Amino acid sequence: MAYYEANKISYEIRGRTIFKEISFQLEQKEFVSLVGANGIGKTTLSKLMIGIQKPSGGEIRLDGVPVSEYALFEVGRKVGYLFQNPSCQIFCPTIMEELLFSLRFQGGETPEGRDRAVEMMRRFSLLDAQNSPTHCLSQGEKQRLALATILMNQPEYLMLDEPTTGLDQVRKTELGHYLQEIHQSGVGILMISHDQDFVKQMSQRILRLDDGGLYEED
Ligand SMILES: Nc1ncnc2c1ncn2[C@@H]1O[C@H](COP(=O)(O)OP(=O)(O)OP(=O)(O)O)[C@@H](O)[C@H]1O
Ligand SMILES: [Mg+2]
């Protein structure tokens, strides 16, 4: 069964067509990558999928329901979204506060929530950095914190916009392991990336945006 179905979606901005009548499906538990040149519309497409932006035409369904019929927070409960720049989504002064803030819609801070936050810090190697202000964290630490924060809510699906940006080889390999582990736990993943090796290594299927169309790669 597909968790995302996009039916002939188009997107125009200021008279310019970014893509036209593209259709695709993402199956349950699939790891799919979305690739294409800079400025081709990958981030835009992912934002349409979570309802932050609206398509000019066509319809996107999430779990069978048009995305336009969900409130943004309802999509947010199902889909964890990692922004292209992780600094955009970190706004609490400490790692612990950031992790716990993500639980605000689930009754806020509880002993179980704190346990989960500590477990996330351990899993994402953030324990050593826990006393640093979040704005002083390294790029890799910010990225791991953003991912850990998303996972606090146990999303069913993950959307990652260029998750390897700014990571060295060691951190990239480590991210690959985290993502594989998350995928194996049953989470469907859509990853936008320019990193061809990483894409090949991680994905079951590759979609390419090119010249207004979407194509399946062999
Ligand atoms: N709100 C907006 N107003 C004007 N133009 C926009 C807007 N959103 C996106 N665009 C334009 O749409 C095009 C696609 O942008 P998008 O960020 O989706 O590309 P991308 O494939 O993610 O690129 P990159 O690989 O550089 O991240 C760009 O030319 C961008 O300038
Ligand atoms: Mg982008």
Image (spheres, rainbow, N blue to C red):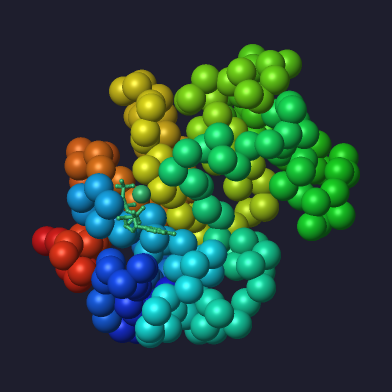
For this rendering, which residue is in front, 36 or 177?
Answer: 36
Residue 13, how many percent across, how many down? 36, 68
Relative depth, front residue between 118 and 165 = 165
Q: Residue at x 54, y 25 (%)?
A: 141
User: In the image, is residue 136 above or below residue 107?
Assistant: above
Q: Position of 102 compared to 35: left or right?
A: right
Q: Quadrant of the C terminus?
A: bottom left
Quarter of image, res 120: top right
Q: Is residue 31 visible?
A: no
Determine the residue located farthest toward the front in the rendered image: 14
- Figure disc tally: 0
- Can the viewer see residue 198? yes
Could you say where residue 58 lies in the image, as x and y percent from the top left? 38, 84
Relative depth, front residue between 211 and 190:
211
Q: In the rendered view of the protein, which quadrant contains the N terminus? A: bottom left
Could you tell me residue 173's position as x and y percent? 35, 29
Horizontal side, residue 116 vs residue 32: left or right: right
- Image location of residue 113, percent across then percent down: 80, 43
Query: Is 135 left, or right, of 204 in this rendering?
Result: right
Does 121 sit above or below residue 65? above
Q: Residue at x 41, y 48 (%)?
A: 161
Q: Is residue 200 toward the left or the right of residue 121 in the image?
A: left
Kindly identify the residue that appears in the image at 21 percent across and 69 percent down: 212
- The quarter of the displayed image where residue 174 is located: top left
